Amino acid sequence: METTLIVGCGYLGRHVAATLQQTERPILALTGHCDSATALQARGYTAYPVDLDKPCTAPLPDQPYRVLYLVPPNPTQDTDLRLQNYLDALTQHLPTRFVYASSSAVYGDRKGAWVNEDTPVSAHSATAARRIDAENRLRSWSAEQGVSHVVLRIAGIYGPGRLPLARLRNARPAVREEEAGWSNRIHIDDLTRICIAALDHPSPRALYNVADGTPTSSTAFLQAVARHCGICPLPLVSRVEALRVATPGQARFLRESRRLDTTRLRQDLAPQLIHPNINEALQPVS
């Protein structure tokens, strides 16, 4: 049985590891901090710390293995040298497959239009540019090494432990629904299954949009979380007013509007989701 090497064992990585552990599939986890590696070891995982900001010698299993790479690019750099350092460490013992968790941010602002995997990317921001660089590096490396690869362009992740509760409790206003752009999300339960399906599929395609296929505005999401948690609905302001007080990261999010077409995902990796929309996932507290 192939070992799954999870690189970057944070919120998503821990969910994937726990699911694989339930079926007694071998796992090796790499994380950027010694404390995180120790915590993972305490849960029964084989885990090692590794610094991908410099050339490294990454621990590799002796047997065949596949990689789920979840490490974001270094935000202080223009390119993804973390990914390059890791790819360079694999050349002596190649994986059978490399699954890379990218971001749907690579599409930029599409004025609310639907985007599929054939839609051109847009390096409109530093975040998008780093992700595009990473995808291109993996694509070139995979072609040179003959390794199967899958890129998952993932929407916003939500679920237990990943809800904007502090934002809601601080009552920071949201944009009026009629002015709010489209946004996309995926529940952690579904994303976990999708990552494993991308590793397991006998002949996956190289690129997938990953979302629940039911876009909403960010305002609708925030209000759904508020209802779910029994918190008062947020006050609403105009988009102009929201942009005036937003941080640069918040402003980028407010200015972008797109809807992810997930037809390919449903065909290959996730024909049925556990949480097909936020309203089913976030039922109000009774």
Image (spheres, rainbow, N blue to C red):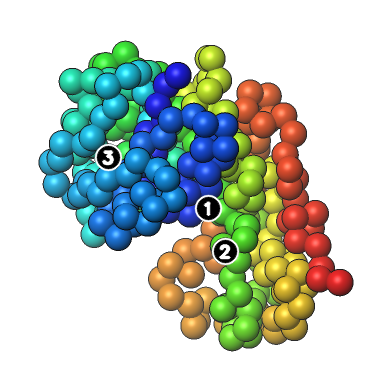
Task: Indicate left or right for 193 with 251 as reference.
Answer: right
Task: Indicate left or right for 16 with 50 as reference.
Answer: right
Residue sitting at the far left: 55
Q: Which residue does the image show at 34% across and 26% down from the upper left?
A: 139
Q: Is residue 119 above or below residue 10?
A: above
Residue designated by label 3: 83
Picture quarter containing residue 263?
Answer: top right
Residue closer to the observer: 14 or 115: 14
Residue designated by label 2: 161
**Residue 94: x, y in percent?**
27, 20
Image depth: mark 2 or mark 3 in front: 2
Q: Residues within 10 Å of mark 3 (few under 14, many from 20)?
A: many
Residue designated by label 1: 109
Q: Regarding mark 1 in the picture, which secondary structure is present there?
A: loop
Q: Is residue 130 above or below residue 209?
A: below
Q: Residues within 10 Å of mark 1 (few under 14, many from 20)?
A: many
**Residue 145: x, y in percent?**
26, 16
**Residue 47: x, y in percent?**
32, 44
